Image (cartoon, rainbow, N blue to C red):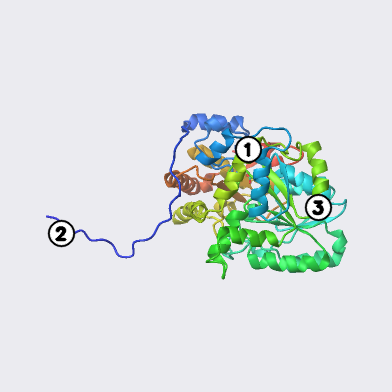
Amino acid sequence: MFGPMRIADNIPTSWCEPWKIKTIEHIHLASAEERRSALEIAGWNTFLLPSRRVYIDLLTDSGTNAMSDVQWAAIMTGDEAYAGSKDFERLEEVVQKVYGYEHLIPTHQGRGAEHIQSQIMIKKGQIVPGNMYFTTTKFHQEHAGGEFEDVIVDEAFDPHSEFEFKGNVDLAKLDRIVQRVGPQGIAYVSLETNVNMCGGQPISMANARELKAYCSKLGIKVMLDATRAVENCYFINTKEAGYEATSISAILAELCSYTDGCTISGKKDCLVNIGGFLALRDDHLAQMARELVVAFEGLHTYGGMAGRDMGAMAVGIVESQDFEYIRARVEQVGYLGKRLERFGVPVVKPFGGHAIYLNVRDILPHMPQEQYPAQRIAAELYLESGVRSMERGIVSAGRDHDGNEYKPDLELVRLTIPRRVYTQSHLDYVSEACARVCQRAESIRGLKMVYEPGSLRFFQARFESLN
Ligand code: F0G
């Protein structure tokens, strides 16, 4: 009856996760009526939805990581001494070894580190050039009296450009600022890895090297936002000539060597749920940071983190360097991107390292930006499927000093993938829901903002539907 089984030619070699699931958390899909009611109570803002009404939570990759059994073991053995915890020593040693900076100042999370860094490094009126703004980073720069200026390459603003290193700094733009205000007018260059606001896009090693060479001549410091540096290193390994055979740790060490220090939100790359740090080479700056951290965060050997959290972070940093891990992480994000593309859903290319971004200008070309199209699509996706995503467009961009709304070129919805949490079938469900929303795009109307907080408005703003 049956002939000999025929094995197909060209069998692909798939990546897979270098872990298996040991504990699960139940999730529940709320009914369509429950979702509609939850969204209205939340003022059409996905940040204000209760998690128990969310089915698949792609709001953020921040603090949503699943920890390994080894990390949980570190939680159990945490040293909660107020001063000089062994977990501080453990974390300090790992940070020195992996990132290569001498001084570690722990903080409760990334923005705590941004606050301290901005206070010690920015003088009133100085410019902080950076490769695109991040919301909390820019807030702290301005709070310290500085002014952010964007020096990212033009390709970053074009969701259709397939340039592989859209995070790169445009040195000509930086040079124009230097010509205008002089090196003393610049606090430092703020260099983000896998630039969040333009789609999780990497910087190249060549660009970091050139930036360092340019800044060194002028005595300008380069400060890294290394929040997603490991994911950036995977792209350097896979996309930049000469790094194919270099380990993730070696790429990271070289990248950090072109910078004078970093801030990190440990809630991303470091595979924990809370924590962050500022790391510095300069002894004097480190001393200033330690003086401030005790006032704003906690003693300089815990900075707002529990001992157990520092222990789990030390383990997480080491785990994040494993090539099989980081490949599965970034390729899983790409898997969602490819599924969406297959359904014809407009997405930012190349695919980012932590998220896929829907290009809402192409989904709702009829809707003016003043009607918050990306905010609306994030809400519609929730109504459709219980999937929570985040607006990254005009609402996130906020207002300038004169009170006018910034009109960013990019009007995006971010589908952010928590690390080691969801499976491919969860992402199949997400991609199908996005496709269904796009199918009915023509009938989707805009939003009106009815409550606007004074700063970082996207977190708590409230909206009403225009239809
Ligand atoms: N820098 C970048 C690039 C970030 O993405 C974040 C946080 C921070 C700094 C601040 O760190 O949250 O620990 O205080 N990003 C989260 C997100 C909130 O969803 O993208 P934090």
Q: Earlier in the sequence, mark 1 or mark 2?
A: 2
Q: Please, is residue 164 above or below residue 144 in the view?
A: below
Tell me the CA gap for discs 1 and 2. 59 Å
Mark 1 residue element: helix
Secondary element at image label 3: helix
Looking at the rendered image, the quarter that the C terminus falls into is top right
* Above or below, 180 relative to 389: below
Dot in front, 1 or 3: 3
Callout 1 amino acid = Asp
Residue named by callout 3 = 283
The residue to which callout 2 is attached is 3
Name the secondary structure under disc 2.
Answer: loop
Kind of residue indicated by mark 2: Gly
Q: Position of residue 58 (x, y in %)?
A: 54, 43
Image check: 283 left or right of 466?
A: right
Q: Which numbered disc flags the more N-terminal residue, 1 or 3?
A: 3
